[in-house]
Image (cartoon, grey):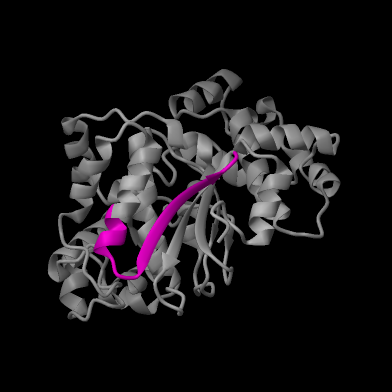
Amino acid sequence: MNLTRNPLDAPSLRDTISIHLVREAVRDCHLPLQPLLQSASIDPMLLGNDQARIPVHSYARLWRQLARALDDEFFGMDARPLRRGSFAFLCRACMHQPTVGAALQRALEFLALMLAAYDGRLATQQSLAEIVIHERSAEPKRAFSCFTYWMIVHGIACWLAGRRIPILAMELRGPAPRYVGDYQVMFSPNLRFERPRTRLIFAAEHLDIPVRHSATELRRFLARAPANILVRYRDPDSLGWRIRQRLRNLPAADFPAIETMASQCGASVATLRRRLAEEGAGYQALKDSVRRERAVLWLAEPQATFEDIAERLGFADASSFYKAFRKWTGASPGHYRSLILDGVGPDGA
């Protein structure tokens, strides 16, 4: 792996969207598909190829074309259309709130008024926060609908915070769709289906981030939407992504020292550190992010003891793992496990 060319940075995985998500986006549009896809520079023949991927900018163009054709920024997935301009209105309303938490409350209230089947609630418990979608129907909503809802809310929250807000876990009431790969990259590797509640869990400390954005910054954000919430907050740093992918393929005990990783990247340690710093990352932070991903997955396994998890993550003992997990998430492993396994949220529902 070097800094300029690497199989892990292949075009098929970078800045592209699976054709599965294109099918999901047009499923409820009830419009002639060929001219719609062609206007977005998407070959209609690709719909029959499960392995096909398209550029993110083409998917973003399709998103805008659908919203325009349907006058609905939620693609006909709700009984009430989310009229064109709703996303821009929501951003303007949120940017005048004092904190990310207050802005999220405003966003969820707005969407609950506009949509018939989605009532999002923000709640906190100690150091964890969750956005729960109280679906106004007995039948669970399909995964693409819930992920689209979260993409809007999480994308706005990340922009307001000026950083990516890491998602610890996402749970859906409905079954897993045929394809989840892009969802795991966009949101979190920790996706769970057929759960009691549909919710997104993150560290509550992000709710206190102050909101400071100008009208000029809002215009720039809207001009780039939705591509910026599809990719920018998904993974803004290609080098960091490549290193993280390499670490994901290794046991934690085999994570290389920075000198070894720099050599594998064909760079000096100083160059690697500088490149990561330019991207707002660090090598230790990348290692910690992979450990955190694994920790939240293993904590959802009731049979895994804290000692087992600590050993699998390369910690000397459970106490070291406990301290690290609190640093990563703001929550203790026990509190996180109880929230996940009990299926009960902060409001007791």
Q: Is residue 163 above or below residue 46?
A: above
Report the residue that reaches farthest toward the top.
270
Which residue shows up at 36% across the image and 72% down it?
A: 24
Q: Residue at x 26, y 57 (%)?
A: 60
Percent position (x, y) of residue 257?
71, 29
Q: Quadrant of the N terminus?
A: top right
Q: Residue at coordinates 46% horizontally, 75% vertically from top-left? A: 140
Q: Quadrant of residue 197?
A: bottom right
Looking at the rendering, the stretch of residues picked out in magenta corresponds to: 110-126
Which residue is at 58% across, 22% downward? 268
Could one spot residue 270 in this view of the protein? yes
Residue 63 is a magenta residue: no
Residue 309: give x, y in percent of width and height.
79, 47
| In the depicted structure, whether residue 66 falls above or below residue 274 | below
Residue 78 or residue 41, whichever sits in front: 78
Query: Viewer-proximal residue, 315 or 282?
Result: 315
Which quarter shows the C terminus? bottom right
Of residues 55 and 99, the one nearer the viewer is 99
Q: Examine the structure image and report whether residue 111 is included in the region drawn in magenta.
A: yes
Lateral position of residue 278 relative to residue 195, left or right: left
Q: Is residue 215 left or right of residue 276?
A: left
